[in-house]
Image (cartoon, rainbow, N blue to C red):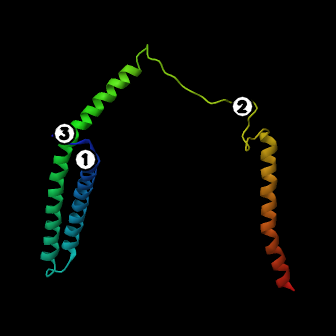
Amino acid sequence: MAENLHPSQLYQHLQMYTCARWSFWGSLAVSCGLLFLGATQKPESKPWILGASVGVLEVGRRHRQTAKLLQESLGDIDRASRVNFQAWARANTQPTAQLALTVGSIDVNWKPENLITDPVEYIQKKQKQQTRLEVVKVMPTVCLQSVYRL
């Protein structure tokens, strides 16, 4: 069936397959939700809710059939793609295979901006900053308490 599929239709078929698959799972979830809802409702509304659940389940079943047909037509393409990739991987991973890697020029003197050259000094500086922050947090409460005492 894949031989009947024109390359310009490939994306459209992939989209339809994905939508049909998601629609199937979505309708299955909605149907289960309606069944659970129907089990907890009054007896007058149960037939309507259960009927809606069966209807949604039937739509999901038809989407599942559509997804299976599309998967068959796309499966041939998928298999051919896998075989081609395996052949490419075999050819490029042989012991005699050549691999070319291009790396841009590297500056020997380059250092990142946030490089910590002296960890001890960095830790001491951070601890001092943290202590200052704690003092600033405590000071306003002390000042407020002394104002209220007056």
- Of labels 1 and 3, earlier in sequence is 3
Q: Which residue is most to the top?
A: 96
> Do the residues under discs 3 and 2 have CB atoms within 8 angstroms?
no
Local secondary structure at mark 1 = helix
Amino acid marked by disc 3: Ala
Give the residue at mark 2: 107
Estimate how packed mark 2 is, as few (under 14), some (14 to 19) or many (20 or more) residues with alpha carbons within 10 Å.
Answer: few
Question: Which residue is at 24% across, 58% downward?
Answer: 23
**Residue 36, x across and y down, in percent:** 22, 68
Q: Nearer the viewer, mark 1 or mark 3?
A: 1
- Of labels 3 and 2, earlier in sequence is 3
Q: Which residue is most to the bottom?
A: 150
Q: Give residue 9's mark.
A: 1
Q: Quadrant of residue 96?
A: top left
Local secondary structure at mark 2 = loop
Local secondary structure at mark 3 = helix
Amino acid marked by disc 2: Asp
Q: Which residue is most to the right?
A: 150
In the drawing, does residue 42 fall left or right of residue 98? left
Q: Quadrant of the C terminus?
A: bottom right
Q: Quadrant of residue 129?
A: bottom right
**Residue 148, x across and y down, in percent:** 82, 84
- Of labels 1 and 2, earlier in sequence is 1
Question: Which residue is at 25% across, 32% downward?
Answer: 80
Give the residue at mark 3: 2
Q: Is residue 138 above or below residue 71?
A: below
Question: Which residue is at 22% across, 39% downward?
Answer: 75
Q: Is residue 107 above or below residue 74?
A: above
In the drawing, does residue 150 fall left or right of residue 75? right
- How far apart are labels 1 and 3 at the CA level? 11 Å
In the drawing, does residue 62 fall left or right of residue 127? left
